[in-house]
Image: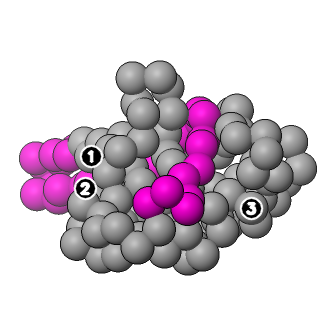
């Protein structure tokens, strides 16, 4: 989850905004054909062939770089939906195309994936 802390420097009258947790490490899964064409939480139609993701912690439209630590491959995705299973420790549910870019969909899950905000 992206958090912001404000640092107030009263003597100088300056306010700084510092991002923490701009990076996360955790499990990534995917979803595809069963949801293809359905409306997402953002109102867009889900396209399993687009580079998108479902996230419960990022705003719609946020672009994220997801890196598979086992092979170093990365993909940039846009948040268009909700529904990653955070109660099971899943950070994101990537579209089929996004997952396929960085891993074999047959494995179903990427452990310890690095997720970085890029916008």
Q: Residue at x 47, y 23 (%)?
A: 88
Write down the quadrant of residue 41 in the picture.
Answer: bottom left
Q: Residue at x 29, y 68 (%)?
A: 39
- Determine whether 42 is above or below 59 in the image: below
Q: Nearer the viewer, residue 80 or 57?
A: 80
Q: Nearer the viewer, residue 72 or 94?
A: 94
Disc assigned to residue 100 = 3
Q: Are marks 1 and 2 in contact (CB under 8 Å)?
A: no
Position of 98 with respect to 50 (left or right) is right
Q: Nearer the viewer, mark 3 or mark 2?
A: 3
Please rate how many residues cluster around mark 2, counting C-alpha atoms within 10 Å: few if below 14, some from 14 to 19, many from 20. few
Q: Nearer the viewer, residue 37 or 41?
A: 37
Please rate how many residues cluster around mark 1, counting C-alpha atoms within 10 Å: few if below 14, some from 14 to 19, many from 20. few
Q: Residue at x 10, y 47 (%)?
A: 10
Tell me the CA gap for discs 3 and 2. Answer: 39 Å
Q: Residue at x 42, y 42 (%)?
A: 84
Disc assigned to residue 4 = 1
Disc assigned to residue 16 = 2
Q: First in sequence: mark 3 or mark 2? A: 2
Looking at the rendering, in which quadrant would you find the C terminus? bottom left
Disc assigned to residue 49 = none
Coordinates of residue 81 in the picture (x, y in percent) = 34, 59
Tell me the CA gap for discs 3 and 1. Answer: 33 Å
Q: Nearer the viewer, mark 3 or mark 1?
A: 3
Q: Main secondary structure of the magenta part?
A: strand
């Amino acid at each position: 989850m992206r958090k912001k802390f404000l640092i107030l420097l009263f003597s100088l009258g300056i306010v700084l905004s510092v991002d923490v947790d701009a990076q996360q490490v955790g499990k990534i899964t995917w979803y595809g054909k069963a949801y293809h064409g359905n409306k997402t939480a953002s109102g867009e139609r889900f396209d399993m062939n687009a580079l998108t993701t479902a996230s419960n912690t990022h705003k719609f439209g946020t672009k994220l770089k997801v890196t598979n630590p086992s092979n170093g491959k990365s993909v940039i995705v846009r948040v268009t939906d909700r529904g990653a299973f955070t109660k099971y420790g899943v950070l994101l549910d990537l579209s089929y195309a996004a997952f396929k870019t960085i891993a074999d969909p047959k494995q179903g899950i990427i452990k310890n994936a690095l997720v970085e905000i890029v916008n």
